[in-house]
Amino acid sequence: MPQTGSLVVRAFTSQAQLPVSGATVIISNHEEDGRRKVYSIQTTDESGGTKPFELEAPDEALSMSPGQDAPFSDYSLVVEHPEYFLATFEQLQVFPGIETVQNVPLVPLPRPAGGSDLAEPVVVTPQPL
């Protein structure tokens, strides 16, 4: 019988000194048929964290002998924010009865030259038909 563990994400920048609020956090995994199943979409709060999210994990008794299943379930994590590069994690391990805290260092996107926060729009020319 599956058990659960929980996952908390903590997004930050500047070597863990500044929390990033308003980042979108997506927790998912790949199903056996190759499709992706999304379990949670959350937004980080003012401290850069999410609320704990319960995820399925295997019964720990099944992993007590050599050759048995792994004692954890693995998930994918995507963290995005319009001012930072996309952060992705694969095979994030969630153990039964344990709260996993995943720290996510976000790298700021470069600012356009000239002091303006807005980049010039790209004009797409008509294609010859």
Image (cartoon, rainbow, N blue to C red):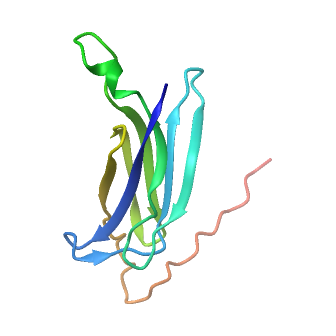
Q: Viewed as shown, does residue 33 lie left or right of 109?
A: right
Name the residue furthest left: 15
Of residues 100 and 62, the one drawn nearer to the viewer in this rendering: 62
Q: Viewed as shown, does residue 37 lie left or right of 114?
A: right
Name the residue furthest bottom: 115
Of residues 13 and 28, the one drawn nearer to the viewer in this rendering: 28
Residue 64, percent from left and from top: 25, 19
Of residues 26 and 83, the one drawn nearer to the viewer in this rendering: 26
Residue depicted at x 19% and y 69%: 15
Question: Looking at the image, how many numbered discs can be counted on the residues?
Answer: 0
The quadrant in which residue 17 appears is: bottom left
Residue depicted at x 63% and y 69%: 123
Residue depicted at x 32% and y 50%: 100
Residue 34, percent from left and from top: 57, 24
Of residues 114 and 79, the one drawn nearer to the viewer in this rendering: 79
Residue 62, percent from left and from top: 35, 19
Residue 14, percent from left and from top: 22, 73
Name the residue furthest right: 129
**Quick check: 18 above or below 5?**
below
Residue depicted at x 45% and y 85%: 117
The quadrant in which residue 75 appears is: top left
Name the residue furthest top: 67
